[in-house]
Image (spheres, rainbow, N blue to C red):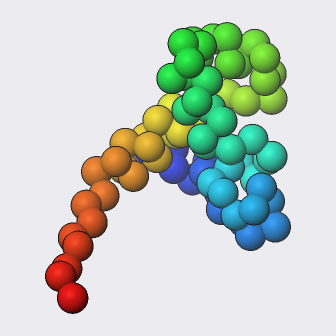
Amino acid sequence: MGLERITIKPDVCGGEPTIRGMRITVSQILEMLAGGMTTEQILQDFPYLDRADVDACLEYAARQAAHREVLLNK
């Protein structure tokens, strides 16, 4: 489980989830993957990231997607 790699700090990237407090957001990594980049390509472009960082982004996204919201009628 690599979720400890995902950090949320109000003073970094406007409080968006980032990787290890750096100024690269989870959403940026997910957008690259969704756009067709491979993990290897991302790691080549961002040598300060690890494979575990990308895996943590995917795990974070999966958990967010599993979140259910119940809307109540007023």
Task: Please identify the quadrant where the N terminus is shown.
Answer: top left
- Seen as rendered, the residue at the extreme left is 73
Q: What residue lies at 68% left-to-right and 49% top-to-bottom? A: 18
Depth check: give the residue in front, 69 or 42.
Answer: 69
Task: Please identify the quadrant where the C terminus is shown.
Answer: bottom left
The location of residue 27, given as percent across then percent down, is 60, 41
The location of residue 55, given as percent across then percent down, is 51, 32
Kindly indicate the quadrant of the structure image that contains residue 12. bottom right
Q: Is residue 21 left or right of residue 58?
A: right
Q: What residue lies at 66% left-to-right and 36% top-to-bottom? A: 28
Q: Is residue 40 left or right of residue 21?
A: left
Q: Is residue 54 left or right of residue 42?
A: left
The answer to whether residue 51 is seen in the rendering is no
Kindly indicate the quadrant of the structure image that contains residue 14. bottom right
Q: What residue lies at 53% left-to-right and 39% top-to-bottom? A: 57
Depth check: give the residue in front, 47 or 15.
Answer: 15
